[in-house]
Structure formats: structure tokens, C-alpha cells
Image (tube, helix red, strand yellow):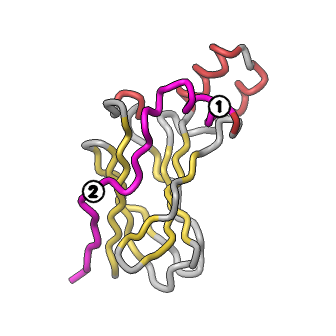
Amino acid sequence: MPEIWHVQEPQWMVANPSAAWRRAKFKSACGCALVSPPILVGDLKDVRVIFAPGKLWMAEYCRLTRKHKKTQVTEVLPKFGSLQLKFSDPPVASRRVFFLVGDLRMGPIDTCPGQVTTEVCELPADWRELHRGTLPIQVEIESA
């Protein structure tokens, strides 16, 4: 039977993601992902969550800031954004990963032994509508 590691507390809380300073953070990263501080999930240390804002956010940002040259970049982004994990040390065994964002549980995606990142997990809904001032992100990892 698989063992499941889950933390009840949000492991990464993106504070007020719609605020001007957060938009500035995404802007400074050219619409690229935000990366969490290292977290501990089960026996995996220094796990980082990668959160990308998505096509809808980027299109709105380009429209509001008149940055039309970035419009073509938005076509390849996931519509609502995405989550991914990055490991400081690649897992030695396969694991199944689930993300919890607000009330949504997404996954599974699988880790691959020897790889430092997981597959991208696309958000099924607009994250801007999922938060109430903060965007809690939790990770569940199931061992094989």
C-alpha cells in the first residue's frame, strides 16, 4: 500500500497574488514563474514549487501595460497557469504528486528518478478567482 505524505498547513502561501507588488514581481520575471522557498514534503527536502501565472494573466498584463510584443509568448502558456516541483536532489524512486490550491486537488503527475523537475500540472481554473487575499498551495507526494 502506498504511503502518502501530506502537510495540513499550506506549504507555500502566495500573499495577495493580485496586488500591484505581485504583478511587479511577475513583470520583473517577464511573466515567468514564481518559485517558493524550499519546503519539506515527507522525506524530500528542499522541494520548491514553481507557479506560473498563465496565458489569461499574461494577456491582461500585456493589454494593461501596452506590452504587445509579449502577446505571441502568451500563446504557448497554459491558459490558467501551472504548477511544477523542483527538487534540489532528484528522487531516487518514482512518486505521484498532487497539488492542492484552495479547494482544488490536481494531479497526479509522476516524478522520474534522476530528474530534478516534475511534469507541468496545468491549473483547471483561473487562480485569480481561487484566492481570497492569499493563494495557499499544498503538495501531496505518494510513495510507490
Q: State left or right for residue 28 relative to residue 109.
A: right
Residue type at mark 1?
Answer: Thr
Span colored in magenta: 1-27
Q: Which residue is mark 1?
A: 74
Quadrant location of residue 29? Answer: top right
Q: Position of residue 37 (x, y in %)?
A: 52, 58
Q: Earlier in the sequence, mark 2 or mark 1?
A: 2
Could you say which is closer to the camera, residue 80 or residue 27?
A: 27
Q: Pick the quarter of the image with the C terminus.
A: bottom left
Could you say whether the residue bearing mark 1 is in a helix, strand or loop?
A: helix
The residue positioned 75% from the left and 18% from the top of the image is 68
32 up-or-down from 43: above or below: above
Q: Which mark is residue 19?
A: none
x and y, in percent, of residue 12 in the image: 41, 52
Q: For the point 48% across and 50% down, which residue is it?
A: 83
**Viewer-proximal residue, 34 or 111?**
34
Residue type at mark 2: give it. Answer: Glu
Up/down of 100 relative to 97, above or below: above
Q: Residue at x 44, y 79 (%)?
A: 94
Q: Quadrant of residue 25?
A: top right
Considering only vertical position in the picture, is 49 above or below 133?
A: below
Rendered image: mark on residue 9:
2
The magenta stretch spans residue 5: yes
